[in-house]
Amino acid sequence: MTDKDLFARMAQSIIDGNKDDAQALAKEAIDVQMNLNEVIESGYVPGVQKVGQLWEEGEYFLPELITSAECMKAAMAVLKPELQKSQIETPTLGRIVIGTIEGDIHDIGKNLVASMLSANGFEVIDLGADVKIETFLEKADEVDADLICLSALLTTTMLGQKRLIEQLEKRGLADRFVVMVGGAPVNQKWADDIGADGYAENAMTAVRAAKMLVNK
Amino acid sequence: MISAIRPKLELLSQEFIKKIVDESYILLERQGIFVENTQAIELFKEAGMKVDESTHRVFITRQLVEDALSSTPSTFQLFSRNGEKVYTIGNDEVHFDPGSAAVTILDHKTQEQRKAETKDVIDFVRISDLMTNIHLQSTGLISSDVPDIISDSYRLYLALLYSEKPIVTGTFRVEGFKPMKDMLVAVRGSEDALSDKPLAIFDACPSPPLKWSNLTTQSLIDSARAGIPSELISMGMTGATSPVTIAGTLVQHVAENFCGIVICQLANKGAPVVFGGSPSSFDMRKGTTPMGAIETMMIDSAYSQIAKHLGLPSHAYMGLSDAKIIDGQAGLETGIGAVLAALSGINVISGPGMLNFESCQSLEKLVVDNEICGMAYRLIAGITQRDDPIALDLFQNFTAETQFLTMPHTRSWYREEHIFPKVIDRDTYDYWISLGKKSISERASEEVEKLLSDNPPDVVDQAVQEDLHSIMLSDAKNYGLSALPEKGLP
Ligand code: B12
């Protein structure tokens, strides 16, 4: 089989949301010692892009979108250790720490955002729900994150977003991390008011916004 | 005389109900359910249930659920603020209350949703109080001019100050329970008087799938012990936090509510509980939770049928809309929901006034929805034989000139048989033009203004006011607020 065929099948596995195929193909690529960066770029990423396109066209709905995102994650999980072994940097658009603010257990929206960011080439560290501000800061520092993404679904926990930004400023870290906020009660105005760098209304626009923010 | 039959909507066969309930029992017994509250875990252990301490997973036997179901009252009563008016919750009684816990209000002037302040919440409470087809009050709007942390107690404070009706409310924090209970006790005079004459229902949501959080479990326990009825708001979202099929979501819904009922009964045997919910058909395209979806209403109607089968009072979020303004969608979703809810005989129906996925309240919509609720009530009142013979007598001297307008028969029955809306448009086209071609939203806004100016606020007695104020203030002081907002307060 030519590389091209293999790439096409990789893309297709993402489009179909077939996790077993996606992982088997990744193993095959490792076995035949393909250039793994090329595998990601020419094999899997076009699949993700196609899925995004199908979504935009109204063909795909959330179950397809998220299943594909999970597939991409699964394929990456196979490839990553190999990339590390050969000391190749995993190609990534940026490193993101994401979570729902302390006191808030709503995590469905946050999970969608995390999946989509990860499928679209970001390295995502998901801290879960009900996360302390201190934990966000520690983790972001530890992994040297580019972006901190904060979800809040309650008007009470929205204030946590503000507090985190205040803490960043207080500790002179405001320039080190870009902060993006979201969640149902959050809007652009709130994001502006608290000095967040970015805001997005849903998971797809979050990807777009994150890409813009890291390119700034 | 033939009396009216009560029209009824039933979506499930007895066989289907039994199957769903059976699976719910099995779920609780085999898979268990997470209960993240140490007091409740202790109660379960005392009752002999198997508990996995490290994961807070509780395995509940069918027997324990059945015992809890049999000690839960099939009906209970709520009483107005002055203790005189009685509202039975159970049987086929239907009571509407405004959809609760909105974070914004639709500003009529700008047609934009914005944060609400004390003055808005007071207007909301007053308008709800005046709506004759909305029997219960709810703490349906959050005030942004006090710290968010006290928004649960503050909304109850305003409702008690300005409304006679019993209140559907709930806590946002464990510490919220005490000031909220204290305020209810202040109105009644003593703890015993409050449990004799409940004034409020406390909502508590499990966290789907199959989990009860610390906050909401504590609310169940505290309420049960204080004689405050709890309303269980299980809210699976099809295909997101619960199975995608309607029947699958029902299995989870019933299991979560069963666990809530058991917790209440273990905390205080005989405690009143409402089998409620706010499930939704999850929109796979938008990632939203449409309350106006017909599938959402089907889930609601079906679990309330199960509640009736189990002999429990029921509740649902129906008669609300996902529209952002008062438009055609707002009317159709609210109308369908209110009618289906009434036909399902749901006891507490939270919805009126609400827009945008349970997040926005509108005073104008409350006024419109009051008329929708009126229609729903009229529908379930059914068709009654008023005379015998039914009509033959009226035709006795029948001629070509016979008309009914001036018959005594017409005069004696027309107000019984028909209802007359205020803001729904029934004018002729020309007259409608002469009135300025107003939309229902504009007419409703005028009605809101008129209601507020014609009806002095129904403020609680001076002495109780002072008690409420001091309870609220001391709660607020714990969070750094030295005074309550002045706006509109007595
Ligand atoms: C499901 C739900 C729950 C579930 C949560 C399950 C879970 N695992 O997440 C349960 C039942 C546990 C729950 C509990 C409670 N809830 Co609740 N809940 C909801 C509900 C119905 C839907 C939320 C949801 O998942 N939406 C679907 C997802 C896909 O959308 P989303 O979260 O908005 O996320 C999208 C965007 O916002 C954005 N986004 C989200 N995060 C981020 C982050 C970033 C960085 C970016 C860029 C974008 C982004 O992208 C997402 C995908 O498109 C909302 C009402 C509503 N329709 O919003 C109420 C709601 C949020 N809940 C509310 C309340 C009050 C509560 C409780 C306090 C109720 C109680 N007394 O028990 C508890 C709180 C518990 C706690 N401490 O957190 C209120 C909040 C009101 C307020 N004043 O803040 C709401 C608005 C309902 C209401 N009107 O009463 N709830």
Image (cartoon, rainbow, N blue to C red):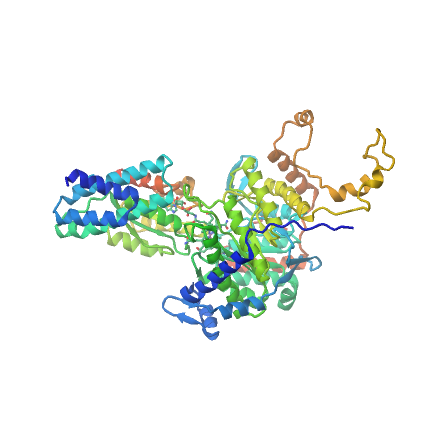
Asked if residue A207 can be seen in this view, the reply is yes
User: Residue A201: where, in percent of width, then height?
Assistant: 39, 41
User: Looking at the image, which residue is at 81% across and 35% down?
Assistant: B404
Q: Residue at x 66, y 38 (%)?
A: B447
Looking at the image, residue B443 lies above or below residue B189: above
> Percent from the top left, x then y, of residue B208?
44, 56
Q: Is residue B37 left or right of residue A207?
A: right
Depth check, front residue: B352 or A142 = B352
Query: How many numbered markers are drawn?
Result: 0
Residue at 63% over, 62% down: B75
Residue B230 sits in quarter: bottom right
x, y percent for residue B335: 59, 42
Frontmost residue, A119 versus A18:
A18
Q: Nearer the viewer, residue B311 or B86?
A: B311
Q: Quadrant of residue A214?
A: top left
Q: Is residue A99 left or right of residue B155?
A: left
* Residue A65 vertical placement versus B397 (above, below): below
> Quick check: A37 left or right of B378?
left
Residue B454, relative to residue B216: is it above or below? above
